Structures are given as C-alpha cells and as structure tokens.
Amino acid sequence: MEKKDIKWSELGFGYVKTDKRYVANFRNGAWDEGGLTEDADIVMNECACVLQYAQTCFEGLKAYTTEDGRTVCFRPDLNAARMYDTALRLEMPPFPKERFVEAVKQVVKANEAWVPPYGSGATLYLRPYLFGINPVIGVKPADEYQFRIFATPVGPYFKGGVKPLTLCVSDFDRAAPHGTGHIKAGLNYAMSLHPIVEAHKAGFAENMYLDAATRTKVEETGGANFLFVTKDGGVVTPKSDSILPSITRRSLMYVAKEILGLKAEEREVHFDEVKDFAECGLCGTAAVISPVGKIVDHGKEIAFPSGMDEMGPVTKKLYDTLTGIQMGRIEAPEGWIVEI
C-alpha cells in the first residue's frame, strides 16, 4: 500500500479528513448492518438529542505500522468493552462489541494509505462515537442513535512531545462522586474546556484535578491518567470511582509488573504525598506517556527529581516497552495486537 504524500513528522494532534468512515444506525430497536461511507458530514434535526442534552460518548484508539511493515491496532476489544459500559450508563443502546472491533478493522483497512510509516512518530488515530440523533425536547433518552468511526493521522498530543510538562492544581472539579467520571462521555470533556483554557492562559500544559468530595486526593487531568514513580522505583496510579479506566494505564501497569518486574499498585494517592515521588507522567491513548516535570499548587512548586529536560528512567522504560510492543519491536502479550 502506497502511503499518502504527507510530512508525517510535522503532524500535530489535529483532524485530517481521510477517505472512509464507518456508520451504523439504531432504529426501531435494532442496529442496521452498517458500512463504510465517503461522506464525512452528519445531517440531523435541530432538536436532535445530542444537541439538546449531550447524549453522546466516544472512544480513542490508534493504528500503527510495525517495524516489519504490518498494520495493527492496540487492544480494540477493551475500547469496545468500555464504550459498551459507557452506553449503558447514558441509557444508549450499546454497539455490539464484536461489531465494534470489526468496524475498527474496516476503517483502518479502508484508510491504510493514511497509516503513518514506521519511525515517523505519527499514528492513525481512530475515533468511534455514539450519539442520540432523533428530535427530543423533553428530558429523556433518544429513540434513534448513530454509531460512527473516523480516522485521522496525528502527531504527538502535547506540542513538546516527550518534553516534561508543567501542570497546575485546578480549582475546578472534574467529576462528582457517583457521577460520570468513570465513563467516556462527551459531557465530561465539555466541563473541562474552561479549566484547560484558563490553564493554558497561565502557561500550564494541563490541570491536575483533585477529588471533588475532599480535594485531598489526586484524580486525573482533563484527558489523561496519572502514573507516579516512587523513589525506590515502584509504580503507583491513583484509584478512584470517578477516574476514567484508561486502557493505556491498564497496559502500562501490566508492563510494569509482569514484564519489567516492578512493584506496581493502584491505590488512593493523597496530594500531600505527591512531593515524595521521584517521577510523574500522564498516560492515555493520545499521549502514551508524557512526563511531568513540575506541578504548581497556587504558586507553590512541586518539582520532581527527574527534572524538566527528559523523561525519568522508569517512565522512559515503561514508554519504550509499551511503544515497543505496539510497534512490533517487543513480543506482545496474547491478544494485545490486532493485525489488519
């Protein structure tokens, strides 16, 4: 497959229209057979439920070119399962998990010329999403839904790539106890837009959100989970019912414990212990791992010993191992890599 003539290494994390996308519709209590289309536009009524009451959710995953030239995806079955759970929470009909994975394969295969070449630093980002599309004026779930997947080639999520970031502790809450923080709903990201704009204006890359109930425990940022490294080389990630269950984080914790032989634990992380960690990183599909060099709490700086120049040694080992698995340089655990 001849690749598109693109300066892959210059790509940012933005939308580029590709050739095909997948669409399926839910009407009269059932999903239709779905299929690929070239039409990137969505036509809906002005009173569509998604426009009135934000009944929508999404996923994010990537396709890669491996070192030996194969096109693969990373753990799409987990994205299918997470979207299934999210749909149930939002009173939407879940898209069948097996069909989700098959639709991912169809979209990648149809856009294979857009999958960046190995070593370019870019990937093909896939965005599955589901939303209520029929008119709804009273507050209730929609009756009709649309499931779609589009693909776009992307570069690093953060402009600095693997350059350590500076975060600030947010005065806003990301998610309420017993709310929707644990699902990938569009409404969670809508509420984070104002805080992230304010953070950027102040010169920070992202916000650190604390738990809404006590504001004493670390949760996550607007778009990624936290990983901390202890001074003795262990890996710790915050545990909370209002944190999104990141597939990248889950994979990194497995890598830490089962492949690298590190102590790895998911537990509550109190903000007052953050100063005692040796390294900090943000993990997610888009970022993989982005190192954090400094966190600013209302003028008070917490600077990690790993510094502001490069990833700390444990974070780098995690990053290199996971990306090595994704790119085919390291043998993957069973079921992690799906070849297109």
Image: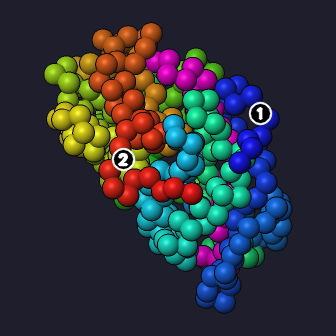
Q: Is residue 274 magenta?
A: no
Q: Which residue is mark 2?
A: 332
Residue sitting at the far front: 68
In what element is the residue under mark 2? loop
Marks 2 and 1, how far apart at CA:
29 Å
Position of residue 4 in the picture relative to residue 197 (left or right): right
Q: Position of residue 327 (x, y in %)?
A: 48, 39
Determine the residue positioned at 21% across, 40% down: 257
Residue displayed at 70% across by 38% down: 14
The total of numbered circles placed on residues is: 2
Relative placement, left or right, of 97 versus 231 is: right
Residue 33 in sight from this viewpoint: yes
Region rendered in magenta: 141-164
Q: Amino acid at mark 1?
A: Ile
- Mark 1 or mark 2, which is nearer the start of the sequence? 1
Look at the image and say whether residue 153 sits in the magenta stretch.
Answer: yes
- What element does badge 1 sit on? loop
